[in-house]
Amino acid sequence: MSGLASTAYAAGWRIVRALPGPVATALFRVGADWAVRRDGAGVRRLASNLETVTGTSGPELAALVRDGMRSYARYWQEAFRLPSRSKEQVLASFVMENEELLWAAQAEGKGLIVALPHSGNWDHAGAYICYRGMPLVTVAERLKPEDLYRQFLAYRESLGMEIIPATGGGIPVVDQLADRLKAGRLVVLLADRDLSARGVPVEFFGRRTRMPAGPAILALRTGAPLFTAALSFDGPIAKAVVSGPLEPPSEGDRTERITEFTQRIADQLAKGIAEHPEDWHMLQRLWLDDPAPARAPKRPAPASPPAKER
């Protein structure tokens, strides 16, 4: 990203917070619909990904892509506005089902891990659990330029999270996270995409992809329980549904157990995504055999049912 992008994000955090809520919502929805009409690479990739997840095509897929882009725009709108919201507002606008599972695990003193997909509003989920009193640690990619990275770092730290950079630290990230788990912290990791050479091969919606090994490695190394969470929007409310803890594999060598555990995470994440595909913000290549995406399907005709309010 360029310095221009950094400036744009900084302006977004200032300007969007100053707008009345309904005005910001309308502007971001217009922006999402414009992006769908423009039919850029990200929209085409989202359409391709959602087609794999849902098996839909034609007008039904087009409506889902439109809703998906509106959901993605909503995430950014709320991200820009979240730091200006009071603790009471953050808590009142978020629902976490099965939250008691996390508190019971924390009470055992081992720390705990939650693996998330790129769905709903993970920043709101993090702020919610921090405001409820559970210390949260996560990892952030070191963006370029450095100023942009520092803006995102300050943003998430303002919500109560501890952020560990994915690269550039003197101590390996996995060692830092293991130390936080030993201290009883909650470690939250986005876990539905890793196309690097280090990613673990898994089946996801019937096709091959790679996912990060970190959640499985940490759970096997520390004994910390590992949960997943499905994130979505429900009208004006952001939502998370916690599942687990997942049973760690007991057989095989280290590599085999990491692979099997990562597959179990993938299977659980897929269940949540399948329930709310419109809230899965995957605008990047995911499956290993994916070619460049074709043009997105045409928008629904005016006679189509109106889009669901989001």
Image (cartoon, grey):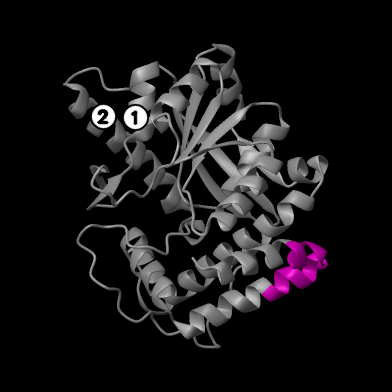
Res 258 label: 2
Which residue type does callout 1 highlight? Ala
Q: Nearer the viewer, residue 67 or 111?
A: 111
Assign a secondary structure to mark 1.
Answer: helix
Q: Which residue shows up at 42% across the image and 85% down it?
A: 298
For residue 84, side relative to residue 57 (left or right): right
Assign a secondary structure to mark 2.
Answer: helix
Residue 85 lies in the magenta stretch: no
Q: Nearer the viewer, residue 243 or 39?
A: 39
Residue at the spot of label 1: 216
**One can see residue 245 in this view:** no
For residue 105, side relative to residue 62 (left or right): right
Which residue type does callout 2 highlight? Ile
Residue stretch in magenta: 14-27
Residue 24 lies in the magenta stretch: yes
Residue 238 vertical position relative to residue 182 in the rendered view, above or below? below
10 Å neighbourhood of mark 1: few (<14), some, or many (≥20)? many
Distance of label 1 from label 2 (alpha carbons) = 6 Å
For residue 286, side relative to residue 88 (left or right): left
Residues at marks 1 and 2 touching, judged by CB atoms closer than 8 Å:
yes
Can you say which quadrant of the picture contains the C terminus?
Answer: bottom right
Q: x%, y% of residue 174?
A: 39, 29
Residue 261 vertical position relative to residue 26 in the rendered view, above or below? above
Q: Residue furthest front?
A: 170
Earlier-in-chain disc, 1 versus 2 = 1
Q: For residue 157, what is the image quadrant? A: top right
10 Å neighbourhood of mark 2: few (<14), some, or many (≥20)? many
